[in-house]
Amino acid sequence: MPDILPPDNVGLVTPQTHKFTTPLALDCGRTLDNYELIYETYGSLNKSHSNAVLICHALSGDHHAAGYYTMQDKKPGWWDTCIGPGKPIDTNRFFVVSLNNLGGCKGSTGPKSINPDTGKPYGPDFPIITVRDWVKSQARLGDVLGISQWAAVIGGSLGGMQALQWAIDYPNHLRHAVVIAAAPKLSAQNIAFNEVARQAILKDPEFYAGHYYQHDTVPRQGLMLARMLGHITYLSEVAMRKKFGRELREGKLNFGFDVEFQVESYLRYQGSSFVERFDANTYLLMTKALDYFDPASEHDGNLSEALAKVLAKFLVISFTSDWRFSPARSREIVNALLNKRKDVSYAEIKAHEGHDAFLMPIPHYMEIFKTYMQQIVL
C-alpha cells in the first residue's frame, strides 16, 4: 500500500455490527431468533437520506468493499475500483453501505457463529439461506440506518441477483437497480459446477459432516479444489491464454504430476490462499443460494411477470467473454423488463477478462457505469 492514500480512495474504514433481535423467518421454513450483520459505510448520508447506495456482494465477497483498515494493508476492499471520490459510485455524492450477508464468514451470523441452542458453532445446522432472505435482512439494516429508500442497489454476479430481487420484493424502496454480470437463474451447467465444488468439500475426510470446527481442522483439500474449479469459470479462455499460455515453470517437461505449467501454479495458489480466508460451510451455503435463485419460478417461468411490479430504473451490464453468466442471460433480464415497459439501460462491454471483468477497471465499463450513476437524482 502507498504511504499516502490516493485522492480517489475512501481512506481508512472501520466495520460496524448491528445485532437484530426481531426473529427473521426464512424461506426454508426455519427462523433465526436473533442475528448480527457486519457492514461498512463510505461517504455521508445527506439530510433527506436520499443518497444511500447498497452494495451486494458476490459468492466469496464480504462487507469490505473499499478503502483500507490500516496503513499496512496490502490491498484495499474488493470493489475499490468502483467506490470512492470521483469513481462510478462516487462517495462525494453517495452514502455507500456494504455488508456481509447472513451465512457469511466475515462477521455476520453464519455457520461459524455460536448456536444459542447448543453453545457450539452452527456448522451444518445453520439454515439454508436464499437471495430473498438476504434482501429481507438488508431491508432491516436499511431501517436501522434510517434509509427508507435506496438511491440504488448495486451488485455483480450473485450481487446482481440480489439487486434484481430487491426491485421485485421492495419496489418502493429503491429508485435504481444496477445488475452487473448476472443472470435471472442458473443454467444446468452452472448448477453442475456448483455441485462438483460442493462434493469436493463434502467428501473431504476433514469435513466431519460440517462439524470440523470441533475437530480443530478445516476441509482444506476440498475447499481448495472447489475454489480452483470456481476460479476457472471466472476467467475466459482468452484471459488464461494471455496470462499463462502454456508456459512451463522450469522451461521443460518433467514427466510427472507435480506443478509444471504456470497456470497450474496459479490455480494452486488461488486455492490455498482461499482456504485461509473463507469457510467451507459458508461456501456450501452461498452456492446453494445461487442454485435456488429463480424469481420467475413463482410466475410459471415468466420473468416478465416476475418483474411486472418493479418501479426502479435499471442498468444492466454484461461482458462479452463472460461464459459463466453470458450476455444472453443479461438480455433475458432486459427483454423481460422491456416487455413490461420498464425503464432499462443495457451495455455489453467488450472485454477478455471473463466473469471477473465486473471487478476490473475496464475504461468503457467505468465510463458507462459512472455516467449512469451521475444522472441519479438525489
Image (tube, rainbow, N blue to C red):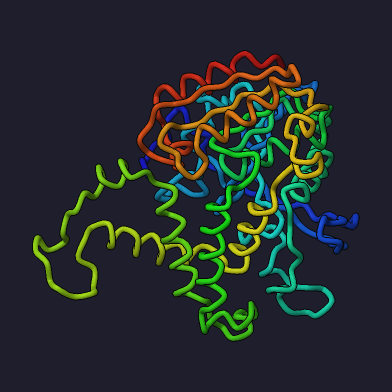
Left or right: 186, with 76 as reference point: right
Quarter of the image with the N terminus in it: top left
Number of numbered discs: 0
Image position, residue 279 (x, y; %): 57, 66
In this orientation, which residue lies closer to the viewer: 88 or 335?
335
Q: Residue lying at the far left in this picture: please name it.
A: 252
Image position, residue 32 (x, y; %): 84, 62
Q: Residue lying at the far front in this picture: please name it.
A: 300
Image position, residue 256 (x, y; %): 18, 75
Q: Is residue 125 above or below residue 215?
A: above
Left or right: 154, with 139 as reference point: left
Quarter of the image with the C terminus in it: top right
Q: Is residue 374 above or below residue 171?
A: above
Residue 374's image quarter? top right
Name the residue at 76% across, 57% down. Answer: 36
Name the residue at 63% across, 57% down. Answer: 286
Name the residue at 64% across, 30% down. Answer: 333
Q: Is residue 257 above or below residue 62?
A: below
In this orientation, which residue lies closer to the viewer: 263 or 215?
263
Name the residue at 70% across, 35% down. Answer: 164
Image position, residue 163 (x, y; %): 68, 36
In this orientation, which residue lies closer to the viewer: 103 or 344?
344
